Amino acid sequence: MRFMVIVKATRDTEAGILPTTEEFAAMGRFNEELVKAGMMEAGEGLHPTAKGARIDFSGGETRVARGPFDLSVDLAAGFWMIKARSLDEVIEHMKRAPFPSGQIEIRQVYAPEDFGETFTPELRERVERLRAQAARG
Amino acid sequence: MRFMMLMIPLGYESAPPDVQLDPERVAAMMRYNEALKDAGVLITLEGLHPPSMGARVSFAGGKPVVTDGPFAEAKEVLGGYWMIEVASRNEAIAWAKQCPASENEIIEIRQVQEMADFSEEVQQAAAGFSELPHAGRA
């Protein structure tokens, strides 16, 4: 099973305040543990929403809004992609993440077998080909 | 520059665990994904199960507190994402506008941080660690 761990934005991340060297090193050690446990596929940080945009698709038209966006909706500041046997295993590892405050959200990633008959063998093959080609980039 | 296109389907915050997909929408989205790939901008993409199957871990007060989904306080949640490599934010916006999204969906575009965005001191602190995996560069 694969999981996405979403790190929630805070006033600090939205203000573009970067981690201190110590915080960065602590997160580096935590990531190393995830790598050694064979759980880490990817991890990225995101620039504040002030440098981003939102596109609304209501009414068949697209409306573009430039950031920053309100923290009252859940904004992301970064994420991990994690391989694990269960949600509980991810929770146990992520409880040890070196965050002094804040919140993370853990969500299971769809695999082709989750879609049932909707996802025909032809569609599945197309997705697998797409992934392989994108990964080779 | 790398950008994430975060797909936010309104209402997904209260979706049941066994949510069903519309085959026609899946096919339309696949055509869009292939267009991204053919243009050489697609790095990776994923879809997420509803939050009713997930969990949140809060670190307020320095102690982790686990809450099982669905999350009553959530106004919107992530349904999936694309990671793309383009020359500018405007190019990312132009790609997002072409997505065959439905009326209740929003795409948020966010730039991904690179090592060069951090101070020299932080870069040196990170240099001690082995090369960590990155989406599409693993």
Image (tube, coloured by chain):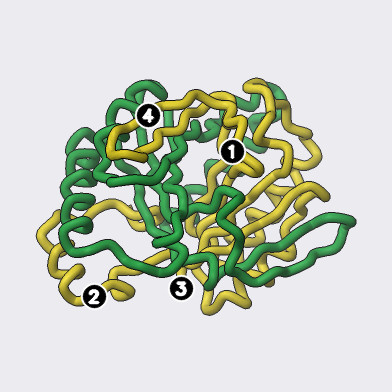
Chain colours: A green, B yellow
The image quadrant of residue B93 is bottom right
Q: Which quadrant of the rendered structure holds the C terminus of chain A?
A: bottom left
Q: Is residue A80 above or below residue B49?
A: below
Looking at the rendered image, the disc whose residue lies closer to the viewer, 2 or 3, is: 2
- Name the side, left or right, on which A20 lies relative to B33: left
Lateral position of residue B70 relative to residue A26, left or right: right
**In the image, B120: left or right of B103?**
left
Question: Could you confirm whether marks 4 and 1 are on the same chain?
Answer: no
Mark 4 residue type = Val
**Quadrant location, the N terminus of chain A:** top left
Q: Amino acid at mark 2?
A: Ser
Rendered image: mark on residue A125: 1
**Mark identifier at residue B24:** none
- The secondary element bearing badge 1 is classed as helix
Q: Quadrant of residue A21?
A: bottom left
Q: What kind of residue is marked 3?
A: Met
Dot 2: within a 10 Å radius of its alpha carbon, few (fewer than 14), some, or many (20 or more) residues?
few
The residue pinned by badge 4 equals B65
Q: Residue furthest left?
A: B128
First along the sequence among labels 2 and 4: 4
